[in-house]
Image: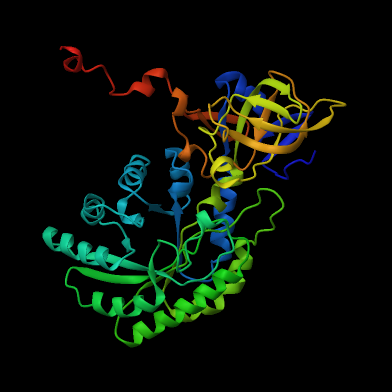
């Protein structure tokens, strides 16, 4: 079988390590399934991204939807990142991680009145509006609060990001943003509202994008709008590229931040404004693994199954996207044979699988497997279906590891749920 190429997760004496820490030492302490993150990966990738755009005035806003563990948020915030929050819950998490709301942006296609009020009251850097009705609602709420709200408008440039349709956001058929034909007139109308201050044009064309061409096309398209609006007297101060940079899951050949910079800096440099970015997956995905233990192996007339203790409740992406996550042993054995098998979990759904038809080293019960690229859109999408407890999260820093979220207890599953005696009195 092939092995995932990573300098952050490597074998030493046939045992998988994260940085300088033996994975088996972690699982021996906290059990499985467990998410394990490399702090060095997060730090290195943030610095690579920031360095690629050092020639221009820019701000990186870490998109916490990819991984909102408090310690992950704090890692990027301490490196100088702003924070992109998509809901009141993500706002709450960011504040708990020590983030100043003035270094947050509030995004999301369906913000509630309370979320808009929360953003205005706490003076987030700007609120990204995604519809005409939302712009007028922000203006109304800001007026009620006696404030002027900083607002950016997300423009949908109708560019094909060439990614999975569920994570494409920049086409005319997608729910996100305001189409580019309508946006120009809306900017002019919104510039006359008393309780908002327009700050910039925002875009986000999709996720897991592996070519710079869609970015280049979208930036060129919206840069023209930016200049025209300035000529009309609309004082915009930022241009937001969004996020969506792809990563390697299997055989993808994603571009680097430097290659992105080379493609779009010639256009951005002429805008004379601050440039914003919202990376999430690029900063976290390949900085994490999910480690799971083999429970059983079995064979029917058609295929092999490896039943593990991790499930779609822990890593949903394979089930909903058909997403590929590389899987390999935590401990290598001499002379092991490769087989083709489905790696499946214990949940009562046929869609509960981590891999199908995968070439993998032959396993036996109690062997452990590492599921790669689990630092983004993994724990944040987990659930308690089938009454399963969500796994712990571990952060590795060199030869030390730290529990940054413990495994849920059965009491967690009940939280404030209890028998209501009045229901059963009659």
Quadrant including the N terminus: top right
Residue name at image x 73 percent, y 38 percent: 358
Residue 184 location, x and y as percent?
A: 34, 79
Q: Residue furthest right?
A: 335
Between 261 and 421, the one lying in front of the other is 421
Residue name at image x 25 percent, y 16 percent: 419
Query: With 32 as the anchor, is 103 left or right in this view?
Result: left
Query: With 289 as the anchor, is 72 left or right in this view?
Result: left
Residue name at image x 57 percent, y 24 percent: 346
Q: Determine if residue 78 is in view.
A: no
Residue 379 location, x and y as percent?
A: 49, 37
Q: How many marks?
A: 0
Residue 147 location, x and y as percent?
A: 16, 62
Between 171 and 249, the one lying in front of the other is 171
Q: Determine if residue 251 is in view.
A: yes
Between 120 and 221, the one lying in front of the other is 221
State the colouring used for the structure image: rainbow
Look at the picture and state if 132 lies above or below 269: above
Look at the picture and state if 226 lies above or below 301: below
Q: Residue furthest front?
A: 301
Residue 239 location, x and y as percent?
A: 42, 71
Query: With 143 as the anchor, is 189 left or right in this view?
Result: right
- Find residue 424 and report its image quarter: top left
Look at the picture and state if 12 lies above or below 409: below
Query: With 230 as the anchor, is 216 left or right in this view?
Result: right
Q: Residue furthest top?
A: 425
Quadrant including the C terminus: top left
């Amino acid at each position: 079988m092939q092995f995932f190429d990573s300098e952050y997760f490597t074998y030493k004496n046939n045992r998988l390590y994260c940085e300088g820490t033996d994975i088996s030492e972690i699982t021996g302490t906290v059990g499985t399934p467990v998410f394990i993150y490399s702090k060095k990966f997060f730090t290195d990738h943030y610095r690579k991204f920031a360095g690629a755009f050092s020639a221009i005035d820019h701000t990186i806003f870490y998109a916490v939807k990819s991984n909102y563990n408090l310690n992950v948020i704090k890692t990027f915030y301490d490196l100088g990142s702003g924070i992109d929050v998509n809901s009141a819950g993500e706002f709450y998490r960011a504040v708990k991680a020590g983030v100043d709301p003035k270094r947050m942006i509030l995004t999301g296609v369906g913000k509630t009145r309370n979320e808009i009020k929360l953003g205005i009251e706490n003076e987030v850097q700007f609120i990204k509006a995604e519809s005409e009705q939302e712009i007028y609602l922000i203006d109304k709420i800001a007026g009620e609060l006696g404030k002027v709200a900083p607002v950016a408008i997300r423009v949908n440039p109708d560019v094909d990001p060439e990614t999975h349709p569920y994570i494409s956001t920049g086409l005319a058929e997608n729910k996100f943003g305001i189409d580019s034909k309508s946006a120009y007139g809306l900017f002019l109308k919104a510039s006359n509202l008393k309780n908002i201050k327009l700050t910039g044009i925002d875009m986000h064309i999709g996720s897991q994008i592996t070519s710079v061409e869609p970015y280049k096309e979208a930036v060129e398209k919206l840069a023209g709008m930016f200049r025209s609006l300035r000529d009309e007297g609309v004082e915009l101060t930022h241009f937001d590229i969004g996020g969506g940079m792809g990563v390697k899951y299997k055989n993808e050949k994603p571009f680097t931040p430097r290659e992105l910079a080379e493609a779009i800096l010639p256009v951005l440099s002429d805008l004379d404004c601050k440039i914003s970015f919202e990376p999430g997956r690029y900063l976290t995905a390949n900085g994490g693994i999910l480690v799971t233990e083999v429970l059983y192996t079995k064979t029917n007339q058609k295929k092999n199954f490896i039943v593990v203790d991790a499930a779609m409740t822990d890593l949903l992406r394979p089930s909903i996207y058909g997403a590929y996550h590389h899987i390999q042993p935590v401990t290598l054995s001499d002379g092991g044979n490769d087989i083709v098998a489905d790696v499946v979990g214990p949940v009562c759904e046929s869609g509960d699988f981590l891999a199908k038809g995968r070439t993998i080293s032959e396993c036996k019960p109690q062997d452990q497997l590492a599921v790669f690229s689990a630092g983004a859109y993994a724990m944040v999408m987990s659930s308690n279906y089938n009454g399963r407890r969500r796994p712990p999260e571990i952060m590795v820093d060199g030869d030390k590891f730290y529990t940054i979220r413990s495994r849920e207890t059965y009491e967690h599953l009940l939280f404030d749920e209890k028998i209501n005696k009045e229901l059963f009195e009659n």
